[in-house]
Image (cartoon, helix red, strand yellow):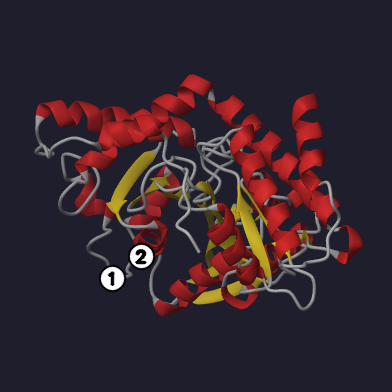
Amino acid sequence: MAKARGRQFFANPGPTNIPDSVLRAMDRPSIDFNDPDFVEVYDAARAGVKRVLRTGHHLFMYNASGHGAWEASLTNLLSPGDAVLVLESGYFSDEWAAMARGFGLEVRTVAADWRVGVSMADVERALAEDKAHAIKAVCVVHNETATGMMIPLPAVRAALDKAKHPALFLVDTISSLGSLEFRMDDWGIDCVVGGSQKGLMLPTGMSFTGVSEKAMAAHAKAKLPRFYFDWTMMANRPQKSFIGTVPVNIFYGLRESVRLIEEEGLDNVVARHSRLAEATRRAARVWAGNNGPALYCTTPDRLSDSVTAILMPQGFNGDALRKTIRERYNVSLGGGLGKLGGTLFRIGHLGDLNEPMLLGALAAVEMGLRVEGVPHGRGGVDAAMEYLAAA
């Protein structure tokens, strides 16, 4: 097959499209991270991340993917044998739980059907039953990238408050920050895990945690071993982050990505993601005709606005469909993760994205379904266009 030409339509849920102005901002020679010219850029970018988090609390940043920020959240806040409560949402909640077990923590899980989502009544019950307050932290993936499902964080905060439970509230925002509504301080979140490669529209490799005063008090007593991610060590450095060299070029890009977000307006960014997500779902609901691919998440008010997961009909493979779409039409989609491998495909609609970019990806999906002989209802792209034109 001939090499594809034209720009690839990147409809992957992470990493995401990097705006040209962000690429240009990072395209510069090295500079000492203690140079006053860079410190000005660093401080501006760091302050911008806090505005996107909507927090006035502490911020620690790392040379690491989001998994590094996960590790930082656990090792800085907990001690060997502590119990954590993980709300099951999919592959990434399971991974966070596995990491906690690896550090010798007791993991309790509020189990959930990955297609339906966790019951808030079950969360309330688990907290109410913990009379001794053995649970030291509640871990929630705000937006489960693997299943295309969102967990309502204010409802989790309400469950903690109703039970008068003192556990720390830990939230993974890796695929929600800069895409979905998020308010660290207003929602009483104690530790926020974030990454560079999704809503912030940067290359992978930088992650961070927002940390409340309550969490900093817990950190002072935490006994899990740590070094590279140690907040006390970081707090004593001029940058208040990083053990080792600061990734200078990514901060030039970060300053620009925050500028782009604030130029559009954070509320408008959230509204755009909601609009593009609903267009994607309109297309998917049409494709579900004739026993075709269907939305994986079946709970309407839990549907993600940054990624849509679509379950393949029995006997058809999502990875084979993705391969056809990439090779024939130069469109990149996400695949199923873990036990969902091959069973679904995922359309990312977050970050630097507009209507024509999304419609191009949706058109490629509809063509790919025809080429692969997957049963489906026709006219999904038309449904998306009709919605977007009216919106």
Q: How many neighbours does mark 2 have within 10 angstroms: few (below 14), some (14-19), or many (20 or more)?
A: many
Task: Report if the CB atoms under discs 1 and 2 are less than 8 Å apart.
Answer: yes
Dot label at residue 75 = 2
Q: Which amino acid does the dot numbered 1 rest on?
A: Pro
**Quadrant of the image occupied by residue 374:** bottom right
The residue tagged with tag 2: helix, strand or loop? Answer: helix
Residue at position x 28%, y 59% in the image: 229
Closer to the camera, 344 or 87? 344
The residue tagged with tag 1: helix, strand or loop? Answer: loop
Q: How many neighbours does mark 1 have within 10 angstroms: few (below 14), some (14-19), or many (20 or more)?
A: few
* Residue, far front: 2
Q: CA distance from mark 1 to mark 2?
A: 7 Å
143 is higher (above) or lower (below) than 181: below
Q: Is residue 298 left or right of residue 44?
A: right
Residue under label 1 = 225
Q: Which amino acid does the dot numbered 2 rest on?
A: Thr
103 is higher (above) or lower (below) than 381: below
Residue at position x 63%, y 42% in the image: 360
Provide residue 234's location: percent of width, then percent of height: 22, 49
* Residue 158 visible in the current orientation: no
